[in-house]
Amino acid sequence: MLEELALKFETTLKKVRGQGKLTEKNISDSLREIRRVLLDADVNYKVAKEFVENVSSKALGKEVLNSITPGQLITKFIFDELVVLLGNSHSEIKLNASGLTVILIVGLQGSGKTTFSGKLANKLKSNGRKVLLVAADVYRPAAVDQLKTLGSQINVPVFSLEEKDAKKVSGGSLKFAEEKNLDTVIIDTAGRLHVDENMMTEVADIKSLVKPNEILFVVDSMTGQDAVNSAKAFNEKVNYDGIVLSKLDGDARGGAALSIRAVVGKPIKFISNGEKLSNLEAFYPDRLASRILGKGDVVSLVEKAQHSFDEGEAERLEEKLRRNKFDFDDFLKQIKAIKKMGSLSSILGMIPGLGSQVKNAKIDDNALVKVEAIINSMTFEERSKPKVLNGSRRKRIARGSGTSIQDVNRLIKQFGQMQKMMSKFSKKGLGSSFNNLNFN
């Protein structure tokens, strides 16, 4: 979704780049295109109209400084307005410093509530919270088993009852949490249609019973304006505190992401992408606006790296690089750390300037799996001393990893080239080498 929008914005903004000044005509032409891009993305009509009017009022009459181009200036106006549209600032979920915190998860059927509940439990646990997951979806077949599977993966207890009574499950979970000295309860409720009055009444009753500190509405980003309509209906019934955008990495047009905050008036708090329990991002309006405009998101990328890479291991790696001792074992550790950060396309999409290029590139995440298999089929000696990898050893590694001789040869050749590059850095000194790199 982000790559598609970014590509369309970039194409539109190219038309005003290189012009000497901003005029009423080129502003009007550009914003007409921007309005079309927003409507094509299924953004709410009123939201798109107001967005364009606000950008136009900021741009008209502005002189272009010698240091910037008209394209840069109007991009700045569009960025500022996107940030406003998405909510201005980051909004945290409410957690009690002492006593029990109850978080209620609501949304439509198939929106990704259960997966998000597991991701949120994983995130809060990593921050020191003692979490309980509650299986209050008593209608969907295997919903309880799905939540138990997610809980077991992150070693978080899951509360459920044999009775198909969501209110009893929700109420009983609070007593259970207090008995087990847990401080955070995440209640995964059943998906419901906003036109189903009985189901909507049930979730309102659960709210009255458990008195949650936070109610989060999970919305499937791929459902367009239907998502916005359901968000309004749920808000009228339970008055939730925040929104979670799921499946934003899918083939969505993006209208829900850009419309929902303006229409409902509630902050977006999380982005839930992919099936991995680590794939959960706190929502920052300025970061998403930057990605939509193809400017990347370096801050989020650095945060992902900090969570995935061990600081002590990084220091040991730097020392190995200085001594030119980087081997296949070190390479394998880096691959595993990169995989924790998410898909390769999502990582590359956060790097400024690569968003639109990544869109049409064939990036195969299974390539890393193949590399892991090849390295795992090597002996300790072969990993530490790649020079011993003769023809017979390479054949054995190919058989053991289920790959071809060509795959093994390609990896060894690429690794040798990488070692040479790192050797140059180590000879110059890592600090001075990086200082001399040109990132413009």
Image (cartoon, rainbow, N blue to C red):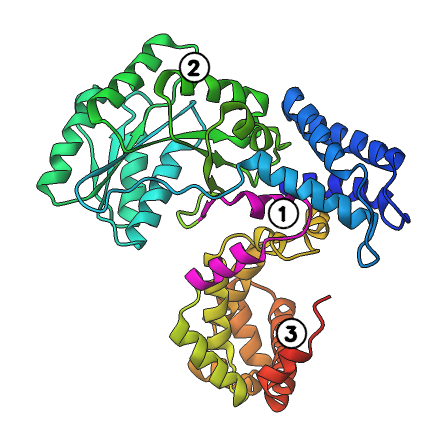
Residue 46 sits above or below residue 198 on the image: below
The residue that disc 1 covers is 291
**What numbered label is drawn on residue 414?**
3
Please name the residue shown 36% across and 8% down the image: 197
Please name the residue shown 62% across and 91% down the image: 427
The tag earlier along the polypeptide, 3 or 1, is 1
Position of 55 with respect to 249 (left or right) is: right
**What numbered label is drawn on residue 304?**
none
Q: Main secondary structure of the magenta part?
A: helix
| Front of the two marks 3 and 2 | 2
| Front of the two marks 1 and 2 | 1
Callout 3 crowding tier (Cα within 10 Å): few <14, some 14–19, many ≥20: few
**Does the magenta run of residues contain 92?**
no
Secondary structure, mark 2, is loop
Residue 427 sits above or below residue 115 on the image: below
Q: Position of residue 48 (x, y in %)?
A: 68, 26
Callout 1 crowding tier (Cα within 10 Å): few <14, some 14–19, many ≥20: many
Along the viewing direction, whichever of 8 and 92 lies nearer the viewer: 92
Amino acid on which the number 1 mark rests in the picture: Arg
Marks 3 and 1 sit apart, C-alpha to C-alpha, by 31 Å
The residue that disc 2 covers is 194
| Front of the two marks 3 and 1 | 1
Q: Position of residue 10 (x, y in %)?
A: 76, 44
Amino acid on which the number 2 mark rests in the picture: His
Residue 28, by quadrant, is top right
- Image quarter where the C terminus lies is bottom right
Residue 137, by quadrant, is top left
Callout 2 crowding tier (Cα within 10 Å): few <14, some 14–19, many ≥20: some
Do callouts 3 and 2 mark residues in contact (Cβ within 8 Å)? no
Please name the residue shown 69% across and 79% down the image: 436
Task: Tell me the magenta residue range.
Answer: 279-307
